[in-house]
Amino acid sequence: MIAGNAMGFLEEFMLDCDIVPPKAYIGKDTDLFTAQTKLGVIEFNSPSGDFNIYVVMEESPSEMAGVLTFNIPEIINNHIIDMFIPKGISVYTTKTREETIKVLESQQDVMLLFLNQMYTANTDFTDFIQVILSKRPACHIIFYSVQSEWEPRLIERFPNSVLGFIPRAFDTAKIFQTLVMILNKLGVKYHHKRNFIRIKVTPKDNIPALLYKNLREETENIVNVSVEDLSVGGALLVLPFTSKDDFKPKQILPRAQIKLKGYVVRFKAEIMQKVENKIAVRFLDITNDDIKKLSHFIHDKLRDTVLKEILTK
């Protein structure tokens, strides 16, 4: 059986909907592709129209990429975090020029700086851009502005770095779509496979986790564990030695939860690997809301880590 989700167009426009995947049945001895095929295309004809299903036979994760936002309004910045971090694109947030320069120096994955031109009145950005490019010559800059305040001379002065501005009249979805198109031009494909952004978790973070051996609520079925690292796709968990023999590779955990600073993320998981009393799990069933919670926790942790490194230098 071959099944595919007709989601490409909808994802581009950030539309949510439920689609029943189309299905086709072929004989078990039928070869659709060769061993050398990396991307296969299956054409379908249906009463409601023709469509294609793309089958990726082999795909290497794309290189990491990052976006730095400078004094962007919170509602817009939150949407950027929600949409980029689950795709393996880092988001760093800064409030001062000094922080911005330090992040650019320390985080080599940053490719695009999204800069609010109007965070202070009558600000000349020429010197700031010169400093940015002296540190990161390959960095690209897009402003958040309005036509009446925009300075075209910035493009003339820095033609290979300043890309223009995104109008403040755009809503959050359109701003995001514009950023996706810019990154696409820079070679960062939004829908390409990437490794998840992983962050180290310390005892100071205080994020306890619970694993359920089965669906029952009895105390003996619940195990308290600690989190060692975390992403939107899974976690590395540390079991108490008294319970380490209760968990095996490939075991499905029907229920689990992690408490993150004021909210709880719940999920179903599979144990992918086990070493002594540590298990690596991947999330099998997790809501979009919980993915957003994880994304914001990861963003805040990235910011805290970077700022701590800056202060200790």
Image (cartoon, helix red, strand yellow):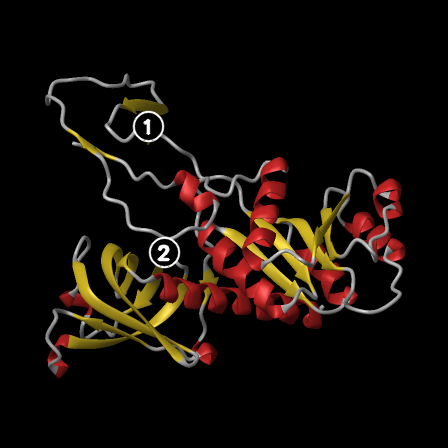
Q: Which quarter of the rendered picture does the C terminus lie within? A: bottom right
Q: Amino acid at mark 1?
A: Phe
Q: Is residue 193 left or right of residue 119?
A: left
- Determine the residue positioned at 64% across, 50% down: 108
- Determine the residue positioned at 23% across, 43% down: 20
Task: State the image coordinates of residue 123 (x, y, percent, origin top left).
Answer: 87, 64
Mark 1 lies on residue: 51
206 or 193, nearer to the observer: 193
Q: Which mark is residue 233?
A: 2
Q: How many numbered dots are placed on residues in this image?
A: 2
Q: Is residue 111 left or right of residue 195?
A: right
Asked if marks 1 and 2 touch (Cβ < 8 Å), the reply is no
Q: Is residue 279 left or right of residue 139?
A: left
Task: State the image coordinates of residue 287 (x, y, percent, origin top left).
Answer: 32, 62
Task: State the image coordinates of residue 191 (x, y, percent, origin top left).
Answer: 46, 41
Q: Secondary structure at mark 2?
A: loop
Q: Which numbered mark, 1 or 2, is in the foreground of this view?
A: 1
